[in-house]
Amino acid sequence: MRTTTLTAECPARLLADVTLRPRILQTNEDCYDVLPNQITSATPETKSRMKALLLTDYKQLEVTDFEKPGVEANDVLVKVRACGICGSDIHGYDGSSGRRIPPLVMGHEAAGVVEEVGSNVRDFKPGDHVTFDSTVSCGHCSFCRAGDINLCDNRMVLGVSCGEYRRHGAFAEYVAVPQNICYRLPNELPFEHAALIEAVSIAVHAANRTPVSLGDTAVVVGSGMIGLLVIQAIRLAGCSRLIAVDLDENRLRIAKELGADECLKADTVDVVEEVRKITNGRGADVTLEVVGATPTVRTAIEAARKGGSITLVGNLAPNVEVPLQSIVTRELSVYGSCASCGEYPACIDLLEREAIRVEPLITAKASLDQGPEWFARLYAGEAGAMKVVIDPTL
Ligand SMILES: [Zn+2]
Ligand SMILES: [Zn+2]
């Protein structure tokens, strides 16, 4: 990671730096440490082979012959038709996040066709189109039982290995997932759109965490992959005026296409001042931060009106500095938002009806064999690149 000297007068400098690589903003699907359990293992009878994109060492990906996952009683074996490369995969790829320890098959944003089901599975059958949550929740801890599956005590994330567990993901011909995280898809929904449901669910969850009244003004700080989905979700939640913030002209152009009323380029204007101008000096009712760094968090806080709220979605930096007095004396409410809990059916519906659009976010569709090259390109910060979706059947 490059370092840039940051001054209070020029907070956009750091934003430029953190968005430099990767261009895809990191989502927050794997920000918790979890306890190991239910790692799938092949039973001797079902053991066979498949093609998978294996991280053999940091920055080293190989398409290899890999053990096909076994199907436990509660498992659904999915033939993968689409799996998105996530910002967190790019971050993990060089070892910097500590969440992709080789050897590992990454990939947690996927969709495909049911190939086989375990003996306890009643709701899915071979041939069904499905997607699944990136979070493998246990279903029996107090948080799961209260419906807060994203806060599960035994949470594991597909395609992650962090020292405590290794759970192979969906950059492979097949992946086995427990039935409780699976959702049936309409057959008409293209697989590459369905692979973005995980990202859509993060945006919809963030909108659900934000207290919105019809007619509110929202500022979305960061217009990368997740930010562009947040813009669409927060409008559906009732915000009638949307202000998108980023450094990248291309992203702001897409933000406009997807419904942003105003687009502010953070290195050319004073974002907080512009937001005040647009809102008659008041500030935004709600702001959503989708980067996760000190300058952008500060922008989100200062752009909010007195008594307003800030929803924090980005988590690039583990620690950021916040203007405490601005939060206290203006009585701001700060919400964290992680992954999703229960939003998948709504997201599938929103995508099917194109109330949330994902096709402008898809940069390329690629085969497993093209995976290593795309990882290298995204890691190098390829200009204009957003979501690359891998289809192992290509
Ligand atoms: Zn992700
Ligand atoms: Zn649980």
Image (tube, rainbow, N blue to C red):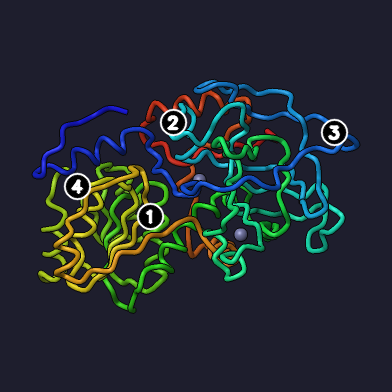
Q: Are marks 1 and 2 in contact (CB under 8 Å)?
A: no
Provide the secondary structure element on which disc 2 rests. Answer: helix
* First-in-chain label (1 vs 4): 4
Q: Quadrant of residue 189?
A: bottom right
Which amino acid, by three-letter code, is at mark 1? Val
Residue, disc 2: 378
Using the rendered image of the protein, determine whether residue 192 is visible from the camera's viewpoint: no
Q: Residue at x 38, y 57 (%)?
A: 258
Q: Which residue shows up at 68% across the image and 30% down it?
A: 52
Residue 11 falls in image quadrant = top left
* Left/right of residue 7 with respect to residue 75 in the rendered view: left
Of the residues under marks 3 and 1, which one precedes in the sequence?
A: 3
The disc, 3 or 2, on the residue closer to the chain's N-terminal end is 3
The numbered dot on residue 47 is 3
| Residue 313 image label | 1
Q: Amino acid at mark 2?
A: Leu
